[in-house]
Amino acid sequence: MKNIAVVGAGTMGNGIAHVFAQHGFEVWLIDVSEEILEKALSTIRQNAIRQVNKQILTEEQMQAMMHRIHPVTQLATGIAQADLVIEAATEKFEIKQQLFQQIDKLASANAILASNTSSISITRLAASTRRPQQVIGMHFMNPVPVMQLVEIINGFHTEAHVTTTIVELSRQLGKTPCVVNDYPGFISNRILMPMINEAIYTLQQGVAGVEEIDTIMKLGMGHPMGPLQLADFIGLDVCLSILQVLQEGLGEPKYAPCPLLVKMVQAGCLGVKTGEGFYRYKNGPKEKEVNPIFHTHRTF
């Protein structure tokens, strides 16, 4: 594989493009918005500068990496030469399904189609195409340039050679691939999201405050980030969508989203990306304080 297309230039899409370009692949980064593409390239450059400062990359390697990323707004142009197309759009089935139908029509017959979904069924997405045997999940973790794991998800029809190809490709990126089967939430979010949901329940019920919950899980359980801060980092809307997928797909009450989470999403408090979630953020995720709303004694 030489040519990679990444559909969606948001947080995950630009991180995926960064990692592939860093490891010598030609990358077409596709989004409908020129503004989003410009922001993505700026983010990639800023992250690459950090790598130079940490001596992970040289200045020359960074410049070569940036030249390997080709931003485009036309889907057909972006995937015309792709050996692998990775969809990194919003975590909504209908949006991803529509994209897979378009990609399937435009991509070469031999191209592998992958989704970066964190919870949606690969089998359902594959059924939208004429090549379900060439569809697979490639779930990167955020931030992509830093996190080691790639969760690889086999759909019902995914062929063994496709899985082997993606496993080897992940290793070429310096990642550790873990292969799982297609069940709601896979492994990562089937285990993580109920923990985050339970943390929100403990806040809603007044068991402890935001900082106390996060501190207990960091210092007591060795987690690098508390569950409420992590929810803000992921995006509360994304957490809600994943829990809804788990509840619908597995049909168990324990996956029902906490009412406080639902309320916060309805209020537009989505975490770091809106500047307000369980914490308030002034200049990105590092400058934070507990959201003042949780200092009051109101009932949520």
Image: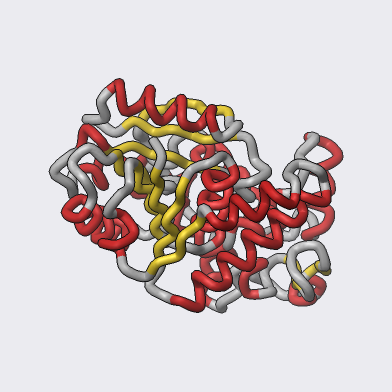
Residue shown at the point (76%, 39%) measured from the top left: 223
Is any part of residue 264 visible from this angle? no
Q: Position of residue 5 (x, y in %)?
A: 39, 51
> In this orientation, which residue lies closer to the viewer: 44 or 129?
44
> In this orientation, which residue lies closer to the viewer: 148 or 14?
14
Residue shown at the point (35%, 47%) measured from the top left: 85
Q: Position of residue 2 (x, y in %)?
A: 41, 39
288 lies left or right of 265: right
Residue shown at the point (46%, 48%) measured from the top left: 26
In the rendered view, would you say 128 is above or below 173?
Answer: below
Number of marks in picture: 0
**Which quadrant of the view contains residue 297?**
bottom right
Residue placed farthest to the left in the image?
130
In the rendered view, would you say 49 is above or below 19?
Answer: below
112 lies left or right of 213: left
Residue shown at the point (23%, 43%) measured from the top left: 126
218 lies left or right of 47: right
